[in-house]
Amino acid sequence: MLSPKKYYTRLVLIILTMASLSIAVKAQTDKIEGVWYNDIKSAKIQISKGADGKFNGKIIWLKEPLKNGKPKTDEENKDEKLRSRPVIGLHILEGFVPDGADKYTDGKIYDPKNGKTYSCNITYKGKTLAIRGYIGVSLFGRTTTWERAE
């Protein structure tokens, strides 16, 4: 049987080890990784880094997940075969690469409301992201602000 002193020493070492591992894992994530509300807080998008080093995002929550009693689907998609896929789980951000300290470029954003895909840049601003979708040149586009949900 362990003496109380040895027991507490081991307990403290275990707690310190777990805290160190937790900090190390958090340090490996990028600042845009995590869960974000869209501009009107009707959806949550989880952004994560793919195996190719690029950042992608998918819808993981909808404020109103049902339409006529059934899960919402990608009904505005131009490809008829994809119109039956659920909106929850839909990948809407794809292929972003870091470009400086707070900017992510060369990505695409899919808008399930109109079924269109746009070129996109993301600018990290602390607890918010400036999402700029555009066609052709960034000058001709629209910026929305997403807020961290975590």
Image (spheres, rainbow, N blue to C red):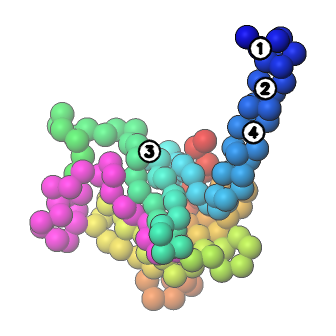
> Looking at the image, is mark 3 or mark 2 nearer the viewer?
2
- Label 1 sits on residue: 2
Q: CA distance from mark 3 to mark 4?
A: 39 Å
Please tell me which of labels 1 and 2 falls first in the chain.
1
- Label 2 sits on residue: 10
Which region shows up in magenta?
A: 74-96
> Looking at the image, is mark 1 or mark 2 nearer the viewer?
1
Please tell me which of labels 4 and 1 falls first in the chain.
1
Magenta region includes residue 134:
no
> Looking at the image, is mark 3 or mark 4 nearer the viewer?
4
Please, which residue is most extreme toward the front here?
Answer: 1
38, above or below 68, in the image: below
Magenta region includes residue 84:
yes
In the image, is 39 to the left or to the right of 111?
right
> Looking at the image, is mark 1 or mark 3 nearer the viewer?
1
Q: Amino acid at mark 1?
A: Leu
